[in-house]
Image: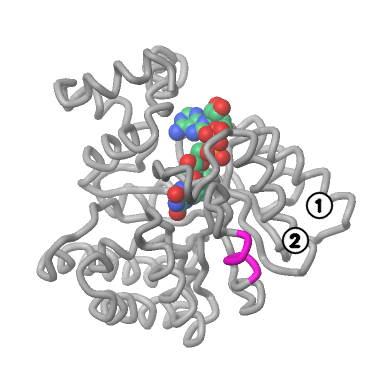
Amino acid sequence: MNWLNKLIVGLMPIAPKFLIGQVAKRYIAGEELEDGIQRVYKLNDHGFLGTMDVLGESITDKAGTEKPMRLYKNLIRELGEHPDLRTGISVKLTQLGLNIDKEFCWENFKEILEMGQEIDLLIRIDMEDSSVTEDTLQIVERAHEIYPKVGAVIQAYLHRSEEDMHRLLEQDINVRLCKGIYKESASIAYQSKEEVRENFIKLGKIYLANGGYLGIATHDEYLIDHFRTYIENKGITTDNYEYQALLGVPIEHILQPLVDDGKTVRIYVPFGEDWYAYSSRRLKENPDIAGYVIKDFFKRDKLS
Ligand SMILES: Cc1cc2nc3c(=O)[nH]c(=O)nc-3n(C[C@H](O)[C@H](O)[C@H](O)COP(=O)(O)OP(=O)(O)OC[C@H]3O[C@@H](n4cnc5c(N)ncnc54)[C@H](O)[C@@H]3O)c2cc1C
């Protein structure tokens, strides 16, 4: 992390909410469910698919899960009213109580699963920090037995991920592969950019070479190029993979040509009133994002 990013993160607690709001605007569809829906419609118009995420923090008491449960149920109900919207949803299990009680979390998630199943919705379980990796994968596996349109996320920086990829491949579970956003120790995670990249490629190929469905979730042009070439050379069809990116990251110049070329590209669309905590947390977890934030701030006029 460079000194400027460190400084920005250090100053965050005293930065005016307005300032963070200017930044968050770019990465978040808005506070309301309708904002998320409208944003996905716009993306659909340009050929992109969506995955909608209700912003929220890890919950520490059972009553705290009522709000995210209500919001997710509202979202699924609303998606049922918009069958033409091309989107799935992404869910964080700590919002549903994973840090409190795994069985309680499962019961919550099962309700979402059953509602989603009724409208044939793709449900992705996001991956959080390493303290919940195993529990999260076990819930994915349990859910997948009931409803196959449940996907997992694997983080390329974790040493354990190679084994996890094989484990999920055996069960034919749809995987989103990303680098990983949390700060993890060197005893369990690769630390250098090169090692993470290398492992990303290795893990992606485990899936692509063996007929698994892979979501290539990265903004790293090197990786996107690498997979594009690999996929072409191997003649892998679009039934087996898609590209994924976060809303607001400026890589349309790469993504739009992929869409125009008939490839599937899905955009992660977070929305909700908890945008401040989400944006702050993202910055603290990965201070390098501060660099993008500042760049965005100065580029704002051009972009808006
Ligand atoms: C669809 C999707 C879902 C994800 N889900 C999860 C998850 O469930 N769990 C998890 O731990 N992580 C998740 N992530 C985050 C991921 O792990 C990385 O932290 C994040 O994508 C940055 O890594 P990168 O692969 O883009 O590579 P980087 O090397 O970090 O970035 C590559 C280039 O992309 C640009 N860039 C990257 N991020 C930004 C940004 N925010 N703003 C502007 N430019 C940017 C920069 O120019 C950078 O040089 C997800 C990412 C995506 C795209």
The colour scheme is one colour
In percent of width and height, residue 259 lies at 68, 45
- Secondary element under disc 1, as helix, strand or loop, is helix
Q: Residue at x 33, y 32 (%)?
A: 283
Amino acid type assigned to the residue bearing label 1 in the image: Ile
Numbered circles on residues, count: 2
- Residue 221 can be seen, yes or no: yes
Does the residue at mark 1 contact the one at mark 2 (Cβ under 8 Å)?
Answer: yes
Question: What's the mark number on residue 208?
Answer: 2
In percent of width and height, residue 279 lies at 30, 36
Instruction: Look at the image and tell me in which quarter the N terminus lies.
Output: top left
Question: What's the mark number on residue 231?
Answer: 1
In percent of width and height, residue 56 lies at 25, 53
Question: What's the mark number on residue 176?
Answer: none
Residue interval drawn in magenta: 162-166
Q: Residue at x 65, y 55 (%)?
A: 242
* Residue 175 sits in quarter: bottom right
